[in-house]
Amino acid sequence: MTKRIMIVEDESIVRLDLSMMLSDNGYEIVGEAGDGEKAVELAFALKPDLIIMDIKMPKLNGLKASEIISNKYNIPILLLTAYSQREFIDKAKKANIVGYLVKPIAESNLIPAVEIALQQAENAKMYEQKVQEMNNELKKRKIVEKAKGILMDKYNLTEDRAFKKMRTISMKKQVTLEKLAKHIIEKYGT
């Protein structure tokens, strides 16, 4: 699947050069902007896979625009700048910045940086999904544990017996343990 990239650069010749390098390497340029305000607007509308953004721009600088975009969407951002000053690097760490390139930019630097940025974003998304799955599983377990505790108190059962009873009912009624646990909590819980 072709990755969708948005370019944000106030110098149109640099924007064109980036666009050509990326297109020549199989990337789809879905949007271009010359200032931070337009970048935010386009990012919200287009939701690209990656944003390549200059730091120094009119209206709204790239760092502030990156921060606004990152607060709403998890879009990775690769920063471009003519400056390699420490303050920019420190500020860049606060947004969803996955890379930092100093101008002038050669294709030999750009393409590897884009590929790494996209891979890092994929890795982050995968870890985020795993954390979400684990949180959901933990919630289910807590519900089952609470229901099991209710059965233990109500029927003076051991933990093992309460769980076996829940599992037997779950299989007989063909409902998940979680659904049965919620029913037990609703009916007998406090």
Image: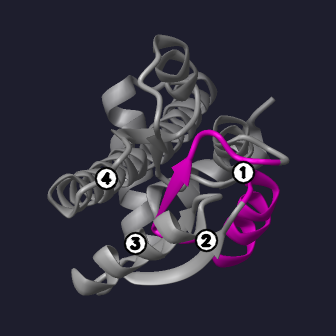
Q: Residue at 57% across / 49% down in the picture?
A: 181
Residue 94 in the image: state x and y as whole percent.
Answer: 57, 25
Q: Is residue 49 magenta?
A: yes
Kind of residue at disc 3: Asp
Tell me the CA gap for discs 1 and 2.
11 Å
Q: Which region of the structure is painted magenta?
A: 35-58
Q: Is residue 141 above or below residue 83?
A: below
Disc 2 is placed on an element classified as: loop
From the image, tell me which residue sits under label 4: 105
Q: Which of 149 and 131 is in front in this view?
A: 131
Q: Decide if residue 139 is on the left or right side of residue 10.
A: left
Q: Decide if residue 115 is on the left or right side of residue 8.
A: left
Kind of residue at disc 1: Lys
**Quarter occupied by the N terminus:** bottom left
Instruction: Give whichever of discs 3 and 2 has the lower sequence position.
Output: 3
Q: Is residue 167 visible?
A: yes
From the image, tell me which residue sits under label 3: 17
Q: Decide if residue 27 is on the left or right side of residue 151.
A: left
**Quarter occupied by the C terminus:** top right
From the image, tell me which residue sits under label 1: 72
Tell me the CA gap for discs 3 and 2.
22 Å
Is disc 1 in contact with disc 3, using a CB cutoff of under 8 Å? no
Instruction: Give whichever of discs 3 and 4 has the lower sequence position.
Output: 3
Tell me the CA gap for discs 4 and 2.
24 Å
Disc 3 is placed on an element classified as: helix
